[in-house]
Image: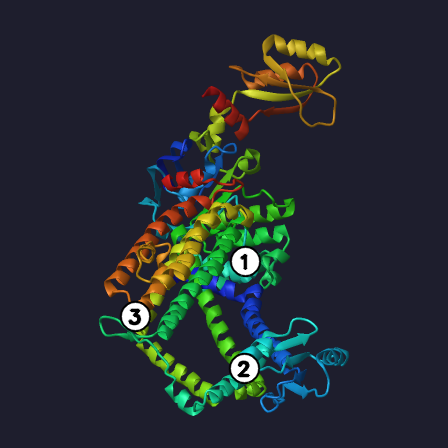
Amino acid sequence: MNPILDIKNISKSYGEHQALNNVSLQVPEGSVFGLLGPNGAGKTSLLRIVNQIILPDTGEVLFDNQPLKKLHIQDIGYMPEERGLYKSMKVGEQAVYLAQLKGMEKSVAIEKLKFWFKKLGIAEWWDKKIQELSKGMAQKVQFIVTVVHEPKLLIFDEPFSGFDPINAQVIRDEILELSNKGATIIFSTHRMESVEELCEYIALINKSRCILQGKLIDIKRNFRTNTFRLGLLTDNPSHAKEIIEQSYTTTITDFKSIDEELKLEIQLGEGNTNELLSFVSQLGRITHFEEVIPSASDIFIQTVKNN
Amino acid sequence: MNHLLLVTKREYINRVRNKAFVIMTFLSPLLMIGMAALVGFLSYKNSDTERHINILDESNLFKSELVSTERYKYTFLTDVDLSEAKTLTEESDLYGLLYIPKSENLEDLSRKVEFYSEGTPSLSVIEQIERVIENKINLLKIQEEGLDADYLASLQIDVNVRLESFKGQESSKLASTLKLAFGGLAGYLLFMFIIIYGNMIMRSVIEEKSSRIIEVIVSSVSPMKLLLGKVFGTALAGITQFAIWVILLVVLGGVASSVFGVESTPMQSEMSIEQASQFADVIQIGIAEIQQLPLLNLFVMFLFFFIGGYLLYASLYAAIGAAVDNDADSQQFMMPILMPLMISVYVGFFTVIEEPHGVISKIFSYIPFTSPVVMLMRIPFGVPIWAQLLSVFILFGTFILVLWFAAKIYRVGILVYGKKPSYKDLLKWMKY
C-alpha cells in the first residue's frame, strides 16, 4: 500500500541525549497506525519531527511521496500529549483562530466548527471561556480543533489520557468514523493495550530505536507460540495435570470463569489441536479452549528481551 | 490569511480586550490628573488661608509698606512693649509677630528685625516680609545718600551671554534645557515602553507554555513567526494604550485647567507686569528655540531607535518567557536585561547632560543595548547624520542577531517543562 508517511533514517539528538537513532517507518495511507513504546522512547520527538516542530539531525520524511514541507501542515492534524487551550479566550473564538492557522477561511471554519460543536453536544459552549469548562468539555474542544480542517493524516499522542470513560468512547467512535472516511490515523501511546484493538499496523519504539513494525496480524502470527489455554472441570485436578504433563509442556494460568477448574496453558509444539482436544476430553469436562494470542505488550517485552 | 498577521491580530485583540489592560488604560490618566489636581488644590487651599500677623514697628518706617492683602492680614500694635506684644499675639492665636526695633542706622536695623511664631513659619511668608523690608531699606539708603532712585534703576544692566556654535547656530541656556527635555523625554518614554510591554510579551509566552497550548500552536505556526507576531501585537497594543493616554491627558488636562484656571488667577495677578512680560519673552524665545531644534531629524530617529530598541529587548523578553515555566523563575534572567537599560538611563541623564559629545556618551550611543536611549538624548545637541545612521545600523544588525538566538532558545524552551533552566542550558539550546 502507498505510504502517506515515509520516515527514512531519522536521527535526533539533544546534546548528549539521543532521542531517535536511525528510525525508519512507513505509515500506509488510510490505515490506523499504533506507535507504541514506553515513556521516553522517542515517540514524541518523532511526532514533533513529522509536525515540523523540530528538525531531524539526519534523515528525511516523505509526506505523500514529497519531502515534508510547510504546506503539509494543512494536511496534518496533531493532538499533542501536552495539550491545552487559551484560558482567557472564548471557546469558539480560539477554535476559529486555530482553524485559521491550519489554513481555513474564517467563514468556512465557523461553519465546520459549529457542525462539530453540535455533533459533540457542546454547541452552547461557543461563547464560554475555557476556564469555565470542565476538563472533559475542554478535551472535546481540543479534539474538534485537531480534526476540523479535515486533514489526511491525524496524529493523536496519548489520546485517551485524561478522558473519562464515556468521553473516551465518544472520541474513539469519532476517530473510527474519520478513519472509515479515509483519513490515516496515528495513535501514539505507552499504554499499548489501550489502542491495540484499534490498530491495523503498529511500530514498536524502544530506547530511540524502532525495533519492530508491520501489520499487527502478521506480527501476532509471527509471535504465536502454538500455545492454548485450557479450562478443565475434573474430580481430580492434580491427577489430570500430571497426565497432561506427560505429553505436553504446561504452565498454571488464570482467567475468569464460574467454576473452580484446572486452568492451564499448554504448549502444543508440533502437535495439533484435535489430538489435544480428544486427549483432554477424556479427563473431564472442557470449559475453556482458546489459542493464546500474544498482546502488543507481550510482543514488545519479548522483542526487547531478544534484542 | 498570513500566519504572522493572524498571530499579531490575536495577540493585539486579546491584549486590548484584557480587563486589566482596559482598566489601566483608562484609570492611569485619571489617576495622574487626579493626583495633579489634588496637589494643586491642596497647595492652593494652603496658600489661600489668611495669615494674621501682628507687627510691632518701633521704627515707624513700614506702616505704609506692609499693607494687608487677601492672604496676609497685618495689624500694627501700638503702645505695647515687645513682651506684651508676644503674649498678646500668642494668646490671640495669630500666625506670628513681626518685630522691627527702633535703630540709629539702617544697617543696624536690617539685622535686628525678628519674627516670633508658634512653630517654624512658612518660608514664603518670611521671604515676602524680607522682600518688603529690603526694598524699603534700600530706598531709604539711596535717599540717605542723596541719590536719585529712578536714575539708579536706569543704570541697572542685565547680562545674557549668547551661545553660538562654530557653524553659526545660535543657542542659549534655555535651548540646552529644552534639548535635554526633548531628549530625556524620548529616552525615558522608550525605557518605560520596553519595561512595560517587554514584560507583557514575556507573560504572554509563559501563559502559552503553562496552558500547554504552545505545542498545538507550533504545529501550525513556526516559532519564529509566533515570536514576531507576539512582539508586533504587543507593540501595537502598547501604542494604542499610549495614544489613549495622550488623548485622555490632553482632554482631561484641558477640563481640569478650565475648572481650576479661574481660581488660580489671584496667583497670577500677584505677578508684576514686569515679571509677566519677562515670562512672555521666555515663552517666545522657547518657541523659537524649539523651532531651531533638528525636529525632523529627531522625529525620524526617534521612530528608528524606538522601534529598534523595542524589538531588541522584546525578543530577549520573549526568549526568557520561553525558557521558564512561571514568573518567579524569570527573575534570575531579568538582571542582564535591566542592567543595560538602567545604565543607558544613567548615562543619558548624568553623562549626556554634562558632556553630550564626551567619550562616554559617544561610546554608549553606539552600543546597541544602550544606544536607543543615549543616542536619542544626544541628537538634540547635534550629532552628524552618519553617526546616527551607523548607530541605527548597529542596532538593527544586533536585533537580527539577537532575534536569531532568541528564536533558538524559544524553539527549544517552549517545549521544555518542569525544569528551571540555567544559563548553561540556554547555551546548549542554541546548539540544538
Q: Secondary structure at mark 2?
A: helix
Q: Residue at x 72, y 14 (%)?
A: A237
Q: Can you say which quadrant of the picture contains the N terminus of chain A?
A: top left
Compared to residue B116, the image places residue A71 above or below, namely: above
B66 or A192, which lies in front? B66
Residue B395 visible (yes or no): yes
- The amino acid type found where label 1 is placed reads Trp
At a point 59% along the width and 86% down the height, the residue shown is: B263
Q: Are marks 2 and 1 in contact (CB under 8 Å)?
A: no
Task: Name which residue type carries label 2.
Answer: Leu
Disc 3 residue crowd, few under 14, some 14–19, many 20+, Cα 10 Å = some
Of callouts 3 and 2, the N-terminal one: 2
Q: Nearer the viewer, mark 2 or mark 1?
A: 2
Q: Indicate left or right for B89 with B338 as reference.
A: right
Front residue of A64 and A145: A145
Foreground tag (3 vs 2): 2
